[in-house]
Amino acid sequence: MESIFPKDMITCQEWSMQALNSVINLADRYKLERNAGISHTNVLDGKALFSIFYNSSTRTRASFMTAMTQLGGETHTLNPGALQTSVGEATKDTGAVLARYGDAISVRYCFVKDKYGEGNYVLREYAKNGVPIINMEDDMYHPCQTLADWMTIRERFGAEGLRGKKFTISWAYGNYIRPVAVPQSLVLMMTRLGMNVTLAHPKGFELDPNIINQAKTNANQADGSFNITNDMDEAIEGAHVLYPKNWGPLSVMPDMKKAEDLQAPNKDWKMTQNRMKMAHKSAIYMHCLPCDRGLEVEDEVIDGPQSAVWDQAENRLHAQKALLTMLIKNRTKP
């Protein structure tokens, strides 16, 4: 019988809702069992994951390494500067060799100074081999963060309680330019859940038009809605989930000077306690981290009772354990 799970996780958009729900349900189970002291070290015993970080990482690196350890497998982190790709070997050739040694390859490539789409291209070159490729964030998508975010929202509102809830993803001012991977992944995933999604940003910070069109299609198919505004307060009004974070303006990137000049006048795009009061009374504040305290968000918000960021961070572990299980456990290497 053909598996419902694709070989690779590059974007959640390429997975069916059946497959994605299976991952989240297993993540929920893993979390409950871990809290009950139940071990999972027999799940991926003897399996190996190669992780390649072209960019720095805290949560993604730590959570993937811990996930493989808790599942009984091993992680081998490779420095891209020490690989032969740095002196000209084709990425797909490196991937083909690693596929003979290990059981999956995870890659993080999300430079904002490169031409948009370069990171996603590199991921898809690695995917031209026989083992699963996992996107640990490229310059278009961040599926593992999205899975953890979905898991966190389900914990707060219930698996059947997301439809019709207002989900707001808003741009926020930051001290450096971030990739668009998180907001683009969120508008794609949350529209598939039938949520009423609002995207807010200053003019010039529009997301990839192809992503926007797909999000509109997702919303129509899931009987939700998708709206875009240049007014942060309008987006926050009555929202159940607030997700303000920084991202760079594709309209001028990869020109960093122009990007910084474009964001400079928008320091008022910040999540404040007063803005939290404008949201629904049961609203939660979310952020993928790291955040710029005092710029993207006030301390009172991220450290307050409505903050879900630490649950989000923890859920990276459980969601990735589930994803690794589904991709590796029962797959036969070619």
Image (cartoon, rainbow, N blue to C red):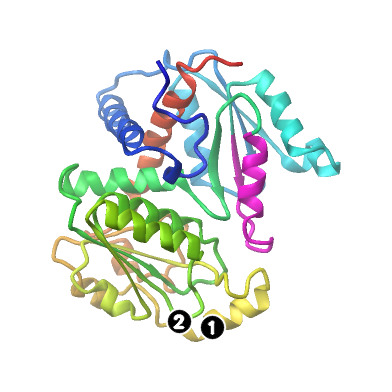
Q: Secondary structure at mark 2?
A: loop
In this picture, residue 325 sits left or right of residue 302? right
* Amino acid of disc 1: Ala
Which quarter of the figure is the N terminus placed in?
Answer: top left
67 up-or-down from 213: above or below: above
Within-10-Å neighbours for mark 2: few <14, some 14–19, many 20+: few
Marks 2 and 1, how far apart at CA: 7 Å
Residue at the image position 66 percent from the left and 73 percent from the top: 256
* Contact flag, marks 2 and 1 (Cβ < 8 Å): yes
x and y, in percent, of residue 6 in the image: 47, 31
* Amino acid of disc 2: Lys
Residue at the image position 53 percent from the left and 47 percent from the top: 58
Span of residues in magenta: 106-127
Give the labeled residue for mark 1: 264
Residue at the image position 60 percent from the left and 78 percent from the top: 260
Whether residue 319 can be seen here: yes
x and y, in percent, of residue 212 in the image: 43, 63
In this picture, residue 185 sits left or right of residue 39? right
- Quadrant hosting residue 4: top left
329 up-or-down from 229: above or below: above
Within-10-Å neighbours for mark 1: few <14, some 14–19, many 20+: few
Give the labeled residue for mark 2: 267
